[in-house]
Image (cartoon, rainbow, N blue to C red):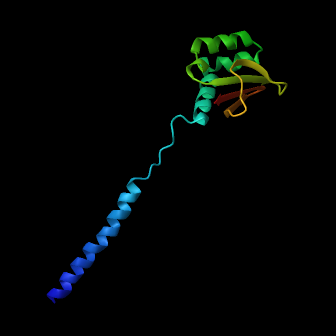
Amino acid sequence: MDDRGFIFSIDAALMLIPLFIIVAAVSHINLTVPQESPYYDVQDAMDAIYYADNGSFINNLANGNVNSANNTLNSFHILDSYNTSYNLTYSINNGSYMVLRSRGTIGPNSKVASATRQQGNVTLKLYMWWG
């Protein structure tokens, strides 16, 4: 009777070894998303532009006040805070896209991320690129 208890205890202790190995392997898995992802930067910038000054930016574009929209961008320094090249375009009534603000040129090996927002008859497109 004592031998069976001893063997059962050793069997249980040996079974804990693979369990500890599995727990150690799983605890070293890195599930974080890089914070410098271009996609997140361009989405954040587009949200900041879209909601700048309680939505007056997009309303100014809809009413044809491009200078007022540019003043809103200048006062909030939204695009200047990103250390990247960008191109912000807009279209009214699905016409041709006009460049509102731009910095840099897209190279053949650039990584490009984009975001689009639309309200009524105004469509904004923001492109950011690295490299």
- The image quadrant that residue 7 belongs to is bottom left
Left or right, 112 with respect to 97, comes to: left
Q: Residue at x 17, y 87 (%)?
A: 3
- The image quadrant that residue 131 belongs to is top right
Q: Is residue 127 above or below residue 53?
A: below
Query: x%, y% of residue 8?
Result: 23, 81
Front one among 12 and 18: 18
- The image quadrant that residue 122 belongs to is top right
Query: x%, y% of residue 20?
Result: 32, 64
Front one among 43 and 54: 43
Q: Residue at x 34, y 68 (%)?
A: 18
Query: x%, y% of residue 46?
Result: 63, 27
Front one among 43 and 110: 110
Query: x%, y% of residue 115?
Result: 67, 32
On-image quarter of the N terminus: bottom left
**Residue lying farthest right?**
95
Q: Is residue 24 above or below residue 105?
A: below
Left or right, 30 with respect to 89, comes to: left
Q: Is residue 7 above or below residue 52?
A: below
Q: How many marks?
A: 0
**Residue lying farthest bottom?**
1
